[in-house]
Image: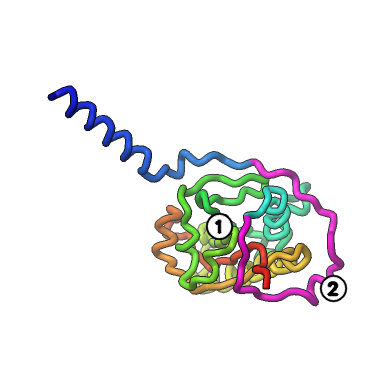
């Protein structure tokens, strides 16, 4: 009888362990392919076609598309100086781009062109308070690291960070326009809850989020 109880107990422990969420440390770092910089649509046409889309179709993004997208958003376009594809006040480069996928949340590392694991599990639902964005392949989260911005007043730091976020988001809009992808930017987020899931420090602030995916066929 004791042997049967022990066997049942071990089976329950195994079942619980298989169902338990995987910690962020167990996600693997993703090395992205080099971005392809050949432009598929003229700039003026991409601006003409730029729009916000709140309806997304099924399907994920390839690693190549994700690499291209993140490089356009906030990648290093001048390797000799480390400067980025979007401007930042005093070149502080205080913004960090996080990528929420069906597997977990990753931080984009522009220098290594890779995704660093932050938290496991499909946490895309935490990146907004609407419903439409949950069908998007990924959700980008823009976070300002105020520790990189010197000793200025916090209100001034937040203003500059908001401007820099806008530059990055517009790069994403133009890339999506050039590649026929759907995107929408938003600020309606439960920031404390999302920040906790992302393990952010008190001096890291969420500025906004942007969904990217395939447009829904009509």
Residue 100 or residue 78, whichever sits in front? 100
Q: Measuring 45% from the left and 63% from the top, which residue is drawn there?
A: 126
Residue 160 in percent (x, y) is at 60, 70
For the stretch drawn in magenta, what is the main secondary structure? loop
Extent of the magenta region: 31-59
Colour scheme employed for the rendering of this structure? rainbow
Q: Is 180 rendered above or below residue 110?
A: below
Residue 94 magenta? no
Mark 1 closeness class: few <14, some 14–19, many ≥20 residues within 10 Å:
some
Quarter of the picture containing the C terminus is: bottom right
Using the rendered image of the protein, determine whether residue 20 is visible from the camera's viewpoint: yes
Residue 57 magenta? yes
Residue 210 in percent (x, y) is at 59, 66
Q: Secondary structure beneath disc 2? A: helix
Q: Which residue is mark 1?
A: 148
Q: Measuring 56% from the left and 56% from the top, which residue is drawn there?
A: 98
Q: Measuring 22% from the left and 32% from the top, which residue is drawn there?
A: 9
Q: Which residue is mark 2?
A: 44
Q: Measuring 44% from the left and 61% from the top, which residue is drawn there?
A: 194
Using the rendered image of the protein, determine whether residue 94 is visible from the camera's viewpoint: no
Residue at the top extreme of this rendering: 3
Q: Earlier in the sequence, mark 2 or mark 1?
A: 2
When asked about the image quadrant of residue 1, the answer is top left
Residue 98 or residue 57, whichever sits in front? 57
Q: CA distance from mark 2 to mark 1?
A: 35 Å
């Amino acid at each position: 009888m004791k042997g049967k109880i022990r066997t049942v107990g071990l089976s329950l422990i195994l079942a619980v362990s298989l169902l338990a969420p995987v910690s962020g440390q167990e996600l693997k770092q993703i090395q992205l392919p080099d971005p392809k910089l050949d432009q598929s649509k003229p700039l003026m046409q991409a601006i003409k076609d730029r729009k916000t889309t709140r309806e997304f179709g099924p399907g994920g993004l390839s690693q190549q598309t994700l690499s291209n997208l993140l490089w356009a958003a906030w990648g290093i376009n001048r390797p000799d100086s480390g400067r980025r594809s979007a401007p930042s006040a005093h070149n502080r480069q205080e913004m960090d781009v996080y990528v929420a996928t069906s597997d977990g949340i990753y931080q984009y590392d522009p220098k290594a062109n890779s995704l660093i694991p932050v938290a496991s599990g499909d946490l895309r639902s935490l990146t907004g308070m609407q419903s439409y964005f949950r069908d998007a392949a990924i959700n980008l989260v823009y976070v300002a690291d105020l520790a990189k911005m010197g000793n200025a007043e916090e209100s001034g730091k937040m203003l500059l960070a908001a401007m820099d976020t806008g530059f990055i988001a517009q790069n994403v809009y133009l890339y999506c326009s050039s590649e026929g992808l759907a995107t929408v930017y938003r600020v309606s987020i439960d920031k404390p809850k999302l920040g906790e899931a992302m393990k952010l420090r008190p001096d890291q602030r969420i500025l906004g989020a942007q969904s990217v995916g395939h447009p829904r066929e009509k």
